[in-house]
Image (tube, rainbow, N blue to C red):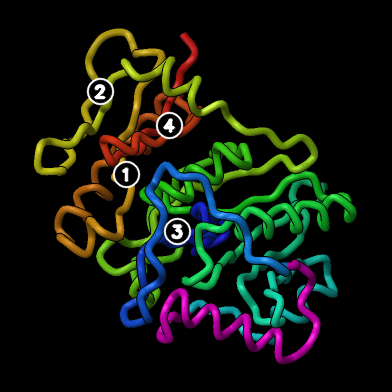
Amino acid sequence: MDRASLYTLSYTSMDRHVPTQRPAAPPRPARAPPPGAPPAASPAGLHIRHLGTQEEFEACVALQHETWGADFSERVPAAILKVSQRLGGVTAGAFDAQERLAGFVFGMTGVENGRLVHWSDMLAVRPDLRDHGIGRRLKEFQRETLLRLGVGVIYWTFDPLVARNAHLNFNRLGVEVREYVIDMYGSNTDSALHRGLGTDRFVVAWDIAAPGASDAPARREATSAARVVNASDGDGVPTIPRLRDGPAAATLRVEIPLEIDKVRDASLSVAGQWRATTRAAFTSLLAHGYRVAGFYRDAEAARGYYILSRKR
């Protein structure tokens, strides 16, 4: 995952590649564009390169603090950010025209079943520069670097409740969900971003040799009548998912709010219900042979929908 913490389109990571929840006490970021709006243009002079100096690695650690909070127990220290690059890892930063760090991506390369693979662990963008496409540019830089090393697939995790990250992962990058993991990083990382929701994550794979992206408008049109297994009521509270008896539907949908951080700020209880219902839906459907086929956003309804399909 990137544990991802973006808000950039959103990444994450992507997750860790990507949190959308805000840290406890940072300055408020600039107002984000509407959920369905395209990302704004990157700032003039923005460029991406591998980190090299001690000051740059320390700036990367400082951005982790700003993103996940000063008490975050799983931050990656400057020494690991530095030495990982000697073994095929990637620690790359986006820098503005004044050479200030605007965002970074970090991951490690290893061997799985005899082939080179990469685990993208962190992606973060400065709060005032989110929603400018910087997260996607960092991922593309990471991809090009790893292709030259002979890596064919990148893994990372992201929070299924973060609509912006889902949009980036499915509709921009074209990832595939490999599994749903309950509390991937434990129930408490000392980060305000994870308070009350735990760290449930999708583990996704990005085939960088032949990346693709879903046709979100076409998928929306084709699946808009598919049953939502956890549809929310008039108060925005999701229902408990139930699979009907009888033949399995070929296509189902799982609903999430477009901005889970705002839901959590308003009611930690309701946010917790979103976690519980989506966890039940994904774990049950994946176990019954469904796969996550895509994601689309409905700005008018302020909802996002995962599309899950099953071969008849």
Of the residues under marks 1 and 3, which one precedes in the sequence?
Answer: 3
Name the residue located 41 percent from the left edge and 80 percent from the top edge: 69
| Residue 48 higher or lower than 287, as above or below | below
Mark 1 secondary-structure assignment? helix
Span shown in magenta: 47-73
Q: Is residue 13 visible?
A: no
Q: Is residue 39 left or right of residue 195?
A: right
Q: Position of residue 296 (x, y in %)?
A: 43, 33
Check disc 2 and give the amino acid type. Leu
Residue at the extreme bottom: 55
Q: Is residue 184 visible?
A: yes
Give the Cα distance between marks 4 and 1: 11 Å
Which residue lies under the disc numbered 2?
Answer: 243
Give the Cα distance between marks 3 and 2: 25 Å
- Residue 286: mark: 4
Q: Position of residue 163 (x, y in %)?
A: 40, 47
Check disc 4 and give the amino acid type. Leu
Of the residues under marks 3 and 4, which one precedes in the sequence?
Answer: 3
Q: Position of residue 94 (x, y in %)?
A: 69, 69
Give the Cα distance between marks 1 and 3: 13 Å
Of the residues under marks 3 and 2, which one precedes in the sequence?
Answer: 3
Q: Is residue 97 left or right of residue 170?
A: right
- Residue 279: mark: 1
Query: Quadrant of the image for the N terminus?
Result: bottom right
Residue toward you, 253 or 114: 253
Look at the image and say whether residue 138 sits in the magenta stretch.
no
